[in-house]
């Protein structure tokens, strides 16, 4: 091989689309097809000064010093394939991808992220298509010949890469230029997490797992922590995402230890909120029954008692498959186990040639992770034996190898091996009851831990108490680095550098996390140091206070921001509630659970929220009439209300009112009266509800609670609404709306604008009704409140019926029904004369069934922007 180019180079990958099928169909004739394919590619590479690096089956990897020449080679190859006379049925279609970057040379191999990116670009293409990355586009766009142009295909998530990539198609004059959507992670619905590091090797394992998934519906990847089960599962999921019509969904069970929460987490991953009156399992079965998708369920060993849930889902939904990871088998009918092997390390008896060693996946992983922390690192003849020894001594365990590789920032591989040999001998000799690989991994983690300074070690163990990650502020409050004479950011940065924790920026703010295997080790060390209970207590206090602080924001203009924040901290909130219950802290537990009810309601965690509330209310030391118990009862009533368990809601609200009367705070009594009145009114006793609302209004005025006054005013319109006294209804709601505008409470304003629009409509004040309804919908859209959006759709549907616009009414009612299904229910259908009835049924009366159904289906496909545009066009006519 001639000297390979260095510096900035362009990598080109190719692959024949459907080669396995062609091989089966053509039989022996495929040999000649393959020979011709190779000849066409090699001639294109030769002509354009490309260096062929390797061939694997039907795939080529080539490198060019010039990006322009690489594009020319790709075009020459595609023209050659198109013009070649193939045997009947033997026409081949080759996908080609190009990316430009820098990658170190190890022997005759390029390694690094840019090589992976080039391979993923090629993998996104279809047969006959040539794709370029943004980097390559920037170098060639102004220099391409007239018969080659570029087509911007937008930004795409590529398999196994954290950063999305804008991709371009090389349009070759005279050849096909129209292709289906790219084969990226965006091709099918999915929630697969972006990976922060490249995936190395495992080609055989990926092929085996794919093959097993083709013939079984429940495949469990097993092995001890650190063997790479999760990364292998995610890689397989990414590479097969286009195989599942309805998507691929990742369910992370690492944040829970309660088996009863497993169905809720699966539903959450699918975007399926609780449906009122339906168990989570029943809702999942109904949702999945007609779908074809893959569930990737990670860390099942923590909640193995919930394994029968998978059996229930797979029995009900024949198009669903499950790829699970677990340290133990799940022991279910039809389960296929695949024991994930470690990466194969080299034979230490062989001569350590760098070029040969780099073919071993364990060595490649070490080299790539070492490059990430030490860009000048190279695998050389001098250090090759030490690198081989490190990977062999660590039994090829990926996590252990990654931990060791981070030390190349400070230690040469030879020094690393010497220290590792000594540490592992000491660490593994005293743990003979553990399996060998588990002892090796624990030894590697312990070795990394021992290399920290004493303050860093204590900080690390304290951070293990977090579940699902943490912010800098949380670390400073819970782990108290200042107490250890460490600056918070300095200590965290050191732990990131040592790969014991990870950092990401999901919302523009650094968020830290810890792999579960490492977290287990940290918790053991924390317990051994006698600090577990005190740190758990600080953790519990911090996150229960966060829950209480969040309460007032969950109904204001920052609702979406705070809901997202609580979503990110859900694992920590669960841990904090569990600590408060186990530690016998009813005041803390009840106050926080009561504060969280709107989060659980808004984000579709109704069943889980009710379980937490019921458990806190059942605490033996929490039966006294306290403000905290009153808040928890109120929260339980709210959850029951949204579950359409009106009898349950009334019971909770009655108890809350009794407690608040004993506590004796007028503002809280007013709130309890209001809630109880709401439930009583929904049950049909409007007069009793009105009496309760009147009493609450008097108390709200007494304590000068303007928001309370506004809410009570709106509910007091019910008798007038039932009697069709719409001018009186409008007067009271307008007063409430003016209060919300003055206070700047946009969300509450939007809800009352819905009622006001309905009243205006009943009073035949068309323009005022439109303005109020559209303003409400716009606000709900701005704050991402699906409950309110559904209510506004319903409001507008009524207005359309009354204005003799049946098609628009059906479209809006269809949009409402579609949204209700997505969020698992939605607001009550109205009561007391407000929003009662079925606008869709009224609209259908004057239409042909086919016309009505067409408008209904059009509405079901409308998004919020479309519905808003429809309403605005109609109001302007």
Image: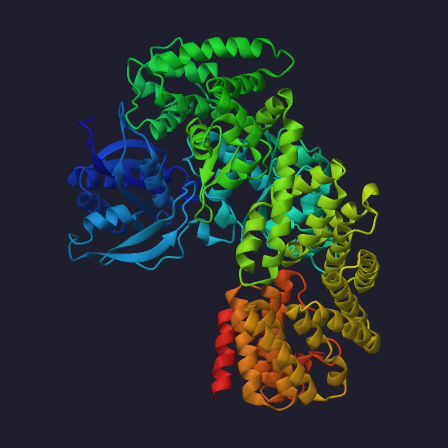
Residue under the point 72% across and 45% down: 589
Residue 705: name its quadrant: bottom right
Residue 453 placed where, x, y %?
46, 20
Residue 847: name its quadrant: bottom right
Residue 348 placed where, x, y %?
40, 11
Would residue 477 be seen by someone viewing this image from the given angle?
yes
* 539 relative to 532, above or below: below
Q: Is residue 774 shown left or right of residue 652? A: left
Residue 874 placed where, x, y %?
50, 84
* 252 relative to 597, above or below: above
* 189 relative to 822, above or below: above
Work out whether residue 358 or residue 389 is closer to the camera in this orientation and state it.
389
Residue under the point 32% across and 36% down: 115
Q: Is residue 379 shown left or right of residue 712? A: left
Residue 718: name its quadrant: bottom right
Would residue 300 be seen by someone viewing this image from the given angle?
no
Task: Work out which residue is located at the far bottom of the displayed protein and give it.
Answer: 764
Q: Is residue 817 shown left or right of residue 584? A: left
Which image quadrant: the N terminus? top left
Residue under the point 49% across and 70% down: 865
Work out whether residue 539 or residue 662 is closer to the camera in this orientation and state it.
662
Residue 39 placed where, x, y %?
24, 38
Work out whether residue 818 or residue 491 is closer to the camera in this orientation and state it.
491
Q: Is residue 204 shown left or right of residue 773? A: left
């Amino acid at each position: 091989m001639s000297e390979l180019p260095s510096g900035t180079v362009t990598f080109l990958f190719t692959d024949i689309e459907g080669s396995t099928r062609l091989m089966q169909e053509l039989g022996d004739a495929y040999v000649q097809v393959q020979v011709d394919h190779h000849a066409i590619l090699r001639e294109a590479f030769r002509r354009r000064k490309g260096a062929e690096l390797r061939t694997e089956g039907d795939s080529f990897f080539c490198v060019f010093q010039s990006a322009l020449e690489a594009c020319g080679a790709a075009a020459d190859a595609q023209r050659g394939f198109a013009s070649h006379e193939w045997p009947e049925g033997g026409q081949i279609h080759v996908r080609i991808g190009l990316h430009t970057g820098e990658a170190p040379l190890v022997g005759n191999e390029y390694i690094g992220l840019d090589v992976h990116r080039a391979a993923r670009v090629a993998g996104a293409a279809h047969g006959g298509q040539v794709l370029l990355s943004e980097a390559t586009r920037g170098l060639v766009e102004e220099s391409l010949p007239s018969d080659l142009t570029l087509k911007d295909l937008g930004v795409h998530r590529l398999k196994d890469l954290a950063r999305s990539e804008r991709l371009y198609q090389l349009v070759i004059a005279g050849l096909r230029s129209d292709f289906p959507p790219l084969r990226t992670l965006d091709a099918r619905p999915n929630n697969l997490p972006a990976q922060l590091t490249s995936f190395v090797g495992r080609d055989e394992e990926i092929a085996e797992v794919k093959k097993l998934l083709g013939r079984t519906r429940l495949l469990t990847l097993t092995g001890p922590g650190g063997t790479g089960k999760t990364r292998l599962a995610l890689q397989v999921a990414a590479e097969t995402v286009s195989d599942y019509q309805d998507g691929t969904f990742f369910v992370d069970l690492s944040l829970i230890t309660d088996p009863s929460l497993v169905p809720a987490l699966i539903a959450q991953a699918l975007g399926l909120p609780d449906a009122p009156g339906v168990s989570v399992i029943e809702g999942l079965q109904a949702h999945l029954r007609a779908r074809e998708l893959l569930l990737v369920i990670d860390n099942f060993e923590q909640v193995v008692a919930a394994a029968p849930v998978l059996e229930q889902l797979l029995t009900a939904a024949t198009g669903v498959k499950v790829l699970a990871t677990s340290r133990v088998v799940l022991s279910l009918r039809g389960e296929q186990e695949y024991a994930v092997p470690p990466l194969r390390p080299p034979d230490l008896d062989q001569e350590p040639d760098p070029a040969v060693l780099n073919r071993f996946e364990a060595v490649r992983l070490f080299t790539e992770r070492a490059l990430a922390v030490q860009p000048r690192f190279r695998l050389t003849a001098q250090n090759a034996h030490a690198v081989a020894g490190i990977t062999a001594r660590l039994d090829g365990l990926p996590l252990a190898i990654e931990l060791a590789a981070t030390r190349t920032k400070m230690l040469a591989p030879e020094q690393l091996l010497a220290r590792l040999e000594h540490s592992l001998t000491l660490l593994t000799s005293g743990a003979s009851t553990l399996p060998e690989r588990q002892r090796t991994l624990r030894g590697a983690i312990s070795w990394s831990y021992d290399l920290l300074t004493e303050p860093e070690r204590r900080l690390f163990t304290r951070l293990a108490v977090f579940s699902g990650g943490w912010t800098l502020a949380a670390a400073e409050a819970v782990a108290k680095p200042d107490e250890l004479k460490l600056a918070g950011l300095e200590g965290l940065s050191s732990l990131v550098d040592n790969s014991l924790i990870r950092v990401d920026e999901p919302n523009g703010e650094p968020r830290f996390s810890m792999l579960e295997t490492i977290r287990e080790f940290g918790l053991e060390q924390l317990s051994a140091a006698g600090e577990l209970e005190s740190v758990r207590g600080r953790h519990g206090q911090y996150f229960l206070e966060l829950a209480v602080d969040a309460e007032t924001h969950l109904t204001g203009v920052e609702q979406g921001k705070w809901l997202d924040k609580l979503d990110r901290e859900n694992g920590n909130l669960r841990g904090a509630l569990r600590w408060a219950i186990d530690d016998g802290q009813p005041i803390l537990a009840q106050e926080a659970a009561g504060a969280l009810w709107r989060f659980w309601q808004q984000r579709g965690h109704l069943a889980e929220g009710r379980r937490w509330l019921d458990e806190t209310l059942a605490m033996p030391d929490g039966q006294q009439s306290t403000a905290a118990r009153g808040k928890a009862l109120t929260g339980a009533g709210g959850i029951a209300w949204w579950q359409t368990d009106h009898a349950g809601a009334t019971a909770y609200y009655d108890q809350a009112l009794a407690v608040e009367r004993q506590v004796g705070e007028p503002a809280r009594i007013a709130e309890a009266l209001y809630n109880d009145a709401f439930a009583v009114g929904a049950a049909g006793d409007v007069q009793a509800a009105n009496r309760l609302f009147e009493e609450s209004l008097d108390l709200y005025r007494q304590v000068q609670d303007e928001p309370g006054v506004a809410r009570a005013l709106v509910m007091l319109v019910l008798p007038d609404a039932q009697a069709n006294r719409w001018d009186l209804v409008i007067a009271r709601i307008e007063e409430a709306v003016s209060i919300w505008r003055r206070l700047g409470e946009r969300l509450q304003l939007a809800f009352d604008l819905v009622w006001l629009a309905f009243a205006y409509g009943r009073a035949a004040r068309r323009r005022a009704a439109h303005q109020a309804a559209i303003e409400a919908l716009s606000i709900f859209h701005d704050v991402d409140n699906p409950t309110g959006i559904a209510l506004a759709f319903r409001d507008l549907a009524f207005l359309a019926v009354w204005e003799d616009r049946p098609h628009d009414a059906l479209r809006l009612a269809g949009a409402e029904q579609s949204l209700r299904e997505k969020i698992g229910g939605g607001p009550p259908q109205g009561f007391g004369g407000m929003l009662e009835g079925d606008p869709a049924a009224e609209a259908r009366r004057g239409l042909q069934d086919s016309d009505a159904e067409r408008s209904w289906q059009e509405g079901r496909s409308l998004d919020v922007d479309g519905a808003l545009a429809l309403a605005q066009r109609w109001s302007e006519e």
